[in-house]
Image (spheres, rainbow, N blue to C red):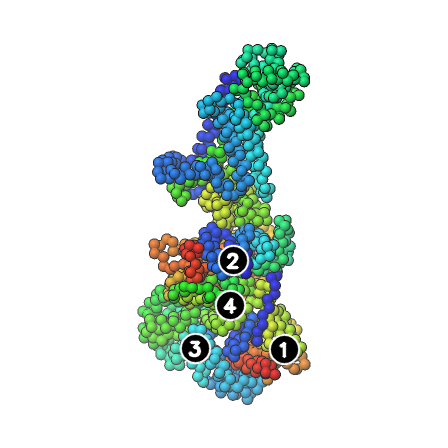
Amino acid sequence: MTGVRQARCDVAVIGAGMAGMAAALFAVERGLSCIQVGNSGGLLFASGLLDLLGVQPVADGRLWQSPYEALAALAREEPDHPLARVDARSIRSAFERFVAALGGAGLRYVSLGERNRKVLTSIGTIKTTFGVPLSMVAGVDALETRPPCLLVDFRGLREFSAVQIAATLGERWPGLRHERIEFPGCEALPELYAAHLARALEAGETRARAIALVKPLLGEARAVGFPAVLGLARSSEVHAAFEAGLGVPVFEIPTMPTSVPGLRLSGALEAVMSARGVRRHHQATVRGLAFDGGGGTATLDLEGISGGERVSARAVVLATGRFSGRGLVADREGVRESILGLPVLQPDSREAWHQRDFLDPSGHGINRAGLRVDDAWRPLGADGRPAWPRLYAVGSILARQDWMRSKCGSGLAIATSWAAIEQVARELRAAAAG
Amino acid sequence: MSSTIFFSTLYASLVLCALGLVWRVSAWFRLRIGPDARDVASSQRVAAVFRGAASALFGSRALRLLGALFLDVLLLRKLFASEKLRWFGHLLVMVGFTLLLLMHALAPLVSAKLFPGYQPTLDPYLFLRDLSGAMVLVGVALLLFRRRADFPQPRRLIDWAFVTLLLIVVATGFVFEAYKIASPRAFYRMTEQFIGSTDRKELEPLRAVWASEFGVAFDDLKQPVDPALLQQGRKLQQDSCASCHSKPTSAFVSYPVARALAPVERMLDAGRANEWLLYLHVFACFLGLASLPFTRFFHVVAAPVSLLVNAAAQNRAFSTAGRASQRALALDACVRCGICDARCSVAPVARYLENAYLLPSHKLVATGALAGGRLLRPGRENDASPDDTHRDEARRVAEGAYLCTDCGRCTSRCPVGLDLADLWRAGRDDLAAVGLPPPEQWVQARSALAWAESLEAGSGQHPLADADAAFAPLSADRRSFSRCVQCQACTNVCPVVAHSIDAEHGIDLTPQKVMNLLRLGLRDLTLGSRMVWDCASCYQCQENCPEGVRVADIMLELRALSVHRLGALRGRREPA
Amino acid sequence: MKYALFLGCKIPAQLPAYELSTRAVLGHLGVTLVDLEFDCCGYPVRDVSRDGFALAAARNLALAERAGLDLLTPCSCCFGTLRHAIRFLGEDAALRARVTQALAAEGLAWSGKSEVEHLLSVLAQKLGIDAIAAAVRAPSAGLRVAAQYGCHALRPSDVTGIDNAMAPTLFETLISVTGATPVDWPRRLDCCGDPLHQANTALSERMTQAKIADALESGAEAICSACPHCHLRFDAVQADSADPSIRTLLYTQLLGLAMRLPAKSLGL
């Protein structure tokens, strides 16, 4: 309607999940201008925990205490796995930068180190992960040492049950108690939602009342676990207040999606993008992506912004994710890549998509479908050559990985984005010089 | 005209007028507009007026009253601000009519006392009388010529009749005067009375002068007139007539009419036009007087009172009793000029929805009808009457009332200074009290389930009927919501859900539940839900949805759809 | 720079100071404001008729188009409404046809030429922060201000196109340039509750109070709004108490004071 806006940038990032956000972050940190399209939907489902690599090989379900040792094993056993193609030093730097940026936006993580950590989940299982938010780290310690501990849940918050957790852990943690309290102010409601509780706890008065409800229940407990509702934007402050008020270490337990840590992550990353001058287009879709033959400029036609926008970019990063984000689309015939129709590495036939046993630990063929990329992280076209000299693909859209079973989702996203942006920077520098 | 007839008809008209005035004025104390007025007794309202008048007249505000009287009532300051042409026309009618009333109709009481030697046939009175009459005619013409409105006020027969009467009064006045100017009969009556003769030959000189310079249409005058005769006649004129008669040429309307009447003057004389023209003129006046309180021209009484009352009340701070009367007064003081409609903020919507009741002038009439019990016949609670047309009318009134944006333009432009903003508020409360509250209230009076059951029983329509598609396109298209994966992101970011901690008034369906019902094809269950009307349209849901579902857009569509579909159900008899 | 000033219904009726201060500030910054015979943007009509709302909005857009001007509005609700109408008319051809016909009956037409701009983005992006900084004579010495954008100015971002709707900084930057200190407050992007104040007064009041409490707890001394609805809502909810907890300011007043414009011209 109103005229199509024109915009230019160095890097256009399509996708705003973990990989897209990481790519945009790394780009601006290298002084590249960036426009990012996509809603942070996938991030809302995140648990707040940053996995690097937890399981290798997937078929055996072997857990590793050191992600870097697991990576070494991965490099030996699956050299074509995307993570195997990024060197360990780059992965360390990438994670450090990412977590530092989150910290700058108020979402603090425990210093990363070399080891994986074990975290209690809201159904009582134990998850192996790498990056842990500060508000959850006391839980890692508690899980290790198993002191007398109290788990608190809120009546009405259906997605979290302290009873359930305690029951699942059973005799493995004898000193684990559970208590249920009313959330202050919500006594009349049958059903509560985590995000509302988190926001409410940012008000000092509500917080004080909640703490006052828990304190008499402490007993012998030397740590207290809550569902992850301790604040939304001010989680550090709320967490610290709880610890001060209860006098013992307090930890959050990650909850089901859409979870508060996911909202925190999304909020923090949006704040980072905003602060670093990344132009964001939520809920816009890429209607067209075209490349000029000379290899200089890509043109994205964006729809869903009043009037539409046409972006000219010198490089494009495809971080569109898999099926839920519609980076990949599956129909009865096969899997296709949704924006450019790039060839997707996939099982030969539809029948080979799945194993007979749905819960087969080695996973299914369809999970490893995705885009093939060259050493410079550029997706290959039908002829086996890069589709475009400065088109890159990162994150879960890549082939030959099963991030859910490997417990390497964040690692995949952050590491591949780092590596790809390194390529972008190199390319653009070379183009400017030559 | 015999003085018995004259005075008896005058008194009868005065009595009728007085009765009418009493009846109309009493309405100011009887009509209850607004819930706060219901608890005030009429006697309290009368008392409040006396108190207010006393304090205004004998206090510091007396000066303000005087100012209002002069600027607003006499000089029509507010009208001047709004529409200058209208103001001019109105001023002409006001001044012209007042002069005619005081100087002509009440001449024996006013003019004769003020001006010794007053004679209606003398200048400047002769000229002024014609001028006044002309002013009235021109003024009325200007006022009748108005911009074509999209929704003009319906004009009642009695109002047209009154205007016609007024025109008859002025017209007969002119014609009667013209007749008398040209009438030989009148001439002879004068000469008989003041000279003592009606002999044509003796009066020849005088007749010559009166024919040539005073327009009398003698049919037996010797032509051409002898100049010596004229000379003689002029001297006679000086002696006998001039003290009472100026040249009728200054009657710039009647004189030309008199010249035009010359050919038929004899017929008129023979037909005793002096009598029936006078009867016509006088009876038209008396009829107008008697009927005034029953027409919209009662505003000549009500509008000044309203202006003065508003001027007297400082900052429009009325007591409850005073306010109750002021509202009823406003209904009468409205002159139906339509200036309020001209710049109404929602006038374009009125045109599009074809509902005149969005416009102030129509809302005012409806407010009065509602207060007077004429809008709705008593029916069941929550219903208008079972009769379809009546119910539709009432619903249209309600739609108009609730689409008002309270922008205040009508109030600031009203030339009579009516507090329309207050009337609209009171009117809305009155509508709610008779079972026509705003949609957010009547929808939430029943549960979503109850509404859904009524829809099923009453409509016989497939839930995804085409008719709704134009109204609510996203809700009618599966593709809008089929991607919903029930992740609850929308519910988690919704401030309405977050703050609905009161279970009784809390929401019944969260946003993701609404989307789920749509996915299940159960849209009818959503229409009556609280969420649909409690949605704050903050768009957090839509902004955060991972699947790009336009949650808020759909919610607002459901809202409009609920008014449309559930509104059609209201008042319908429930199936047995 | 020339715009048709779209005030909407709320400002002239209940917040004339916003109109006064907007004219004063923009006039001082060299922006010409033209007054056309605008009517209601259509916001309340959307509750009962999608067509009526689209027409009401389109008519205003057509008036601006006829005058060859873009619209500038200081009201976030009007801004969002007009832009929503543009979106609906763009995606629904049948609606567009009906509205075009209705407009033609009045001799008006709308072809999508006129843009709708919010006061904040005109200030920050069209005029530019530097131009505004240059006009500031008397910076506000650190007054701690909580910025209230108004939901309809930000969301949905594909309609409003203002800043990053999830982490906007535009208003905070504008506040800084006046010398005041913008505070970070967790509930800053929450709805003020105004749209509900008739449908559900209790709920609306809770929403407003939560925001005020949050602003105070974050150290704010005043809430600065870019929408008359929000501003009036904060005032209304504090009207009953003798001692209002937090000041309410309009941005144009804050900026006007910093530019040393006479207080009377700002409606103060």
Residue B79 versus residue C168 in the image, above or below = above
Picture quadrant where residue A303 is located: bottom right
Q: Which residue is mark 2?
A: C73
For the residues beneath circles 3 and 4, the answer to whether they share a chain is: no
Q: Residue at x 46, y 30 (%)?
A: B21
Rendered image: mark on residue C164? 4
**Percent from the top left, x then y, of residue A222?**
34, 76
Rendered image: mark on residue A109? 3
Secondary structure beneath dot 2 equals strand
Going by the numbered disc 3, the residue's amino acid type is Tyr
Q: Nearer the viewer, residue B576 or C19?
A: C19
Q: Which residue is mark 1?
A: A296
Neighbours of disc 1 within 10 Å: few (<14), some (14-19), many (20+): some
Going by the numbered disc 1, the residue's amino acid type is Gly
Q: Could you tell me how far apart the alpha carbons at marks 2 and 1 are, in whole angstroms?
A: 40 Å
Q: Chain of mark 4?
A: C
For the residues beneath circles 4 and 2, the answer to whether they share a chain is: yes
Secondary structure beneath dot 1 equals loop
Q: Could you tell me how far apart the alpha carbons at marks 3 and 4 are, in whole angstroms?
A: 25 Å
Q: Earlier in the sequence, mark 4 or mark 2?
A: 2
**Percent from the top left, x then y, of residue B84?**
53, 41
Of circles 4 and 2, the one toward us is 2
Going by the numbered disc 2, the residue's amino acid type is Thr
**Percent from the top left, x then y, of residue A394?**
56, 78
Q: Do we see residue B57 in this rendering?
A: yes
Q: Residue at x 52, y 36 (%)?
A: B91
